[in-house]
Amino acid sequence: MLKTHVDAVEGSLLEISKIPANSGHSLHKGTPREAFIRTFLEGHLSERVAVGRGEIIDSNSKPREQRNQIDVVIYKREYPRLDFGGGINGFLAESVVATIEVKSLLDKEELRKAARAAKTIKGLTRNVVTAFSAGYQPPSILSYIVAYDGPANMETVFGWLPDINASEGIVYPDLPASDDSRQQIASPSLDAIFLLGKGFIHFGNAPVGFFQGKVVEQDPGLKWAIADTPRGSLLLLFLFLTSAVSGMAGAWLDPMPYLKSFSVQKCCHGR
């Protein structure tokens, strides 16, 4: 039932995406597609999280410095956010579960931009106090790409990664054999690439996917799963995100690092 439903949604998104494709401006082609993905996520993900768009900041961020604007930000509802107006927000890095870059057409340069942005996001500092946790806890903010069109097979997309990673200084770590240990290894940039209607690529640290069991034991050098499939990409994205928000944690924001620039000339104390 779950696969049939999400596969049908994937097909629907691809069909609907053909409508704005008739527009003559690239902005008009991209914006509706972003809305389609957000609508799917808002209608299917846990109520623990919300979906927005905007910038991600940490305690080291400064006003007016250059930051990436993220198409889709999935964040924890209990955390605050900054309202910049026009539907654009600033999200505390501590609140963000995952980001999604939505591409009308995935090519090597678009993949490079997304990998660069993901690396920057992964480098943000998160100040969280944790008392306890249970279940899967993502080791970092998760970074995904969802594209509506691109190469005919995913091996072509995968073939772009070595050059991009080398030029951007991105080094993916080796993965341990056990499932539990792999899940604690953070990706330094992109976690997965989903090309709707064609297939996916994902790093082998996820709690679901195609790296379970003896796969890594049989070949310790494996880091990526690459698949061509007309359906299933959206389902795998849904499962990744559902796993990321299903664990329990007694954790809260440590706000003090955000107050480094806050001081007063005179402070009095009383009884």
Image (cartoon, rainbow, N blue to C red):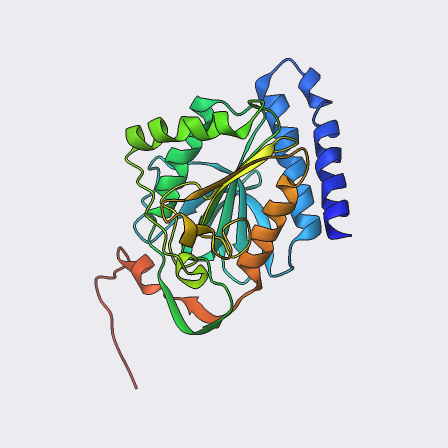
Where is residue 222? Give x, y as percent: 40, 44
Image x and y of residue 172, in percent: 34, 43
Quadrant where the C terminus sits is bottom left
| Residue furthest left as drawn | 265
Question: Is 201 situated left or right of 11 in this image?
Answer: left
Residue occupying image coordinates x 57% and y 45%: 52
Question: 141 or 233: nearer the eye?
Answer: 233
Q: Can residue 42 be seen in the rendering of this structure?
A: yes
Residue furthest out toward the front: 218
Q: Residue furthest bottom?
A: 271
Q: Which residue is pictured at 68% across the width and 44% down the height?
A: 40
* Residue pictured at 71% horizontal, 49% vertical: 43
**Residue sticking out furthest to the top:** 24
| 227 over 1 or under it: above or below | above
The image quarter in which residue 114 lies: top left
Q: Is residue 92 in sight in this rendering?
A: no
Q: Quadrant of residue 125?
A: bottom left
The image position of residue 30, as x and y in percent, is 60, 26
Q: Position of residue 121 (x, y in %)?
A: 39, 44
Viewer-nearest residue: 90 or 180: 180
- Looking at the rendered structure, the number of numbered marks drawn on it comes to 0
The residue closer to the viewer here, 167 or 40, is 167
Instruction: Identify which residue, 92 or 218, lies in the foreground.
Output: 218
Q: Which residue is rendered at x = 76% and y = 40% of the image?
A: 8
Q: Is residue 40 left or right of residue 150?
A: right
Answer above or below: position of 151 versus 252.
above
